[in-house]
Amino acid sequence: MTPSWVLLDNDVGLCFKEEDGEAAAVAAEKNKGVVAAAPPFELWNSTMEFLGSMTPEAILQQPPKISTIRLRCSKARRDAAGVALGAVVACADKSLLVLYGGNYTGPGSSRRGCYLIYDAAVSVTGGALTLTSTVPPLPLSPCLTCIGAGAVALRSHPPSSSYLLAELATSPEGQFPDAELYLWRSDLPAPQWEKKAVRLPEEVRWAPDKYNFCVDIAFSFDTSLCWIDLLQGLVVCHNPLGQQDPQFRFIKLPDGCPPVSISNYPYRPRIQEFRTAAWVAGAIKLVALEGYLEDWDSHQYRLVTWTLTPDLSEWKKCAVFNLTDIWASERYLALKIEQHTPVCPVLSPLDDGVVYVVVNDVEVHNIVQGFEVLETKVDVKGQYVLGLDMPHNKVISIDGGRPAADTVQLTPTLIPTVFCSWLQSPKDRQREAKASEVGESGKKLKVV
């Protein structure tokens, strides 16, 4: 049965098979010798065409298992196209899934790629993911500077299938917090990128010993766009499509999420390892591992969740789950592993109060010569994803664990998305609707 939502790995796999029948032969003949001689514009178009021809395969699993997306084509077509390949999940909203394809990863990157748009609600293959459209890179993208991982998608509610794609960037001519908002509207007769000069809130301005505002997570809610720096706070854009200028406001993180200074952290922490935020049950929610940045003893660490009030003015603390209680739970003890600090928290988009975390079963070995540590080796024995019922302090699920040989990343970027629910059969949707009325904890679950 297709799950109603998934923990989707941000990395998109690429699969190249030996044979692709007649299509491979045609593609090889068509592109033979073209790549080396083609001007840049033709290379950009050929890259978009090739990426759009790749077949998507969604390996969807019920959380806490991790789901993946991969793009498939034959080796012959890849060699004939001669393009640099790569893909990551850019963003998602409702039935929409957006990938960065090729060498393009947003503002400031190469033009050799594009956005790949998949809309499960308008899939024509009955339960399989199909490409809806491709969107070209931003104009003069290499001349821009991205503000982190900031693509945002906003899909209209059915029966409309239109969507908005947004990127936030700065140009060499501008001085932060002056920025440029780029919008792509699919409902226009001839869609193209629209640039709007905007000024971000003063709170994101550079200051001594302070990191520049950098987007870690971005998503949409209602008709607004949201970019979040998990060290500083949220930048929310209201009225992005209105005739008047878009309205931006800054929302500071709760007191339990202190910022860090450059003097204390010369290199910006990979903040997604211990904080995240999402739109859940009609509100912006945040979860953080308190004590991680504050240099507490690991036995003092605790996972804490907050909810932002509807007027976006105040954070309300919701639940606290001490790591010692996680380690003492029956499910964790049954794993027969040491007390490891969970990382990469993810908020369930459907089950309010449920958080998923990654636990890596590792051993660290130092290779020492005399009094000097020559090398540090990490022995990965397995990886687990735990489902936590935060209000009731319960470990409600654990996946079977991924063997060390299959563990690609110790700190994977996992995206909670509901696009897969539109791939369900009518019977599956009815079954999910009944199951969602009462959750495992006995409370009614709210669906976004």
Image (cartoon, rainbow, N blue to C red):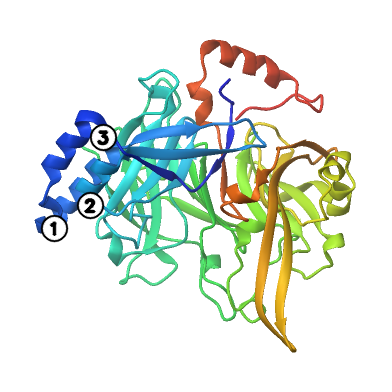
Q: Are marks 1 and 2 in contact (CB under 8 Å)?
A: yes
Name the residue located 72 percent from the left edge and 81 percent from the top edge: 368
Residue 297 lies, with reference to residue 48, above or below; the image says below
Circle 1 residue = 36
Position of the C terminus, as image quadrant, is top right
Name the residue located 75 percent from the left edge and 89 percent from the top edge: 371
Residue 208 is drawn in which quadrant?
Answer: bottom right
Q: At which x and y percent is residue 338?
A: 83, 55
Q: Nearer the viewer, residue 49 or 277?
A: 49
Amino acid type of disc 3? Leu
Q: Is residue 104 left or right of residue 387?
A: left
The mark that comes first in sequence, 1 or 2, is: 1
Amino acid type of disc 1? Ala
Q: Are marks 2 and 3 in contact (CB under 8 Å)?
A: no
Circle 2 residue = 82
Q: Callout 1: 10 Å neighbours few (<14), some, many (20+)?
A: few
Foreground disc of the pair 1, 3: 1
Q: Nearer the viewer, residue 190 or 106?
A: 106
Circle 3 residue = 188
The mark that comes first in sequence, 2 or 3, is: 2
Secondary structure beneath label 1: helix
Amino acid type of disc 2? Gly
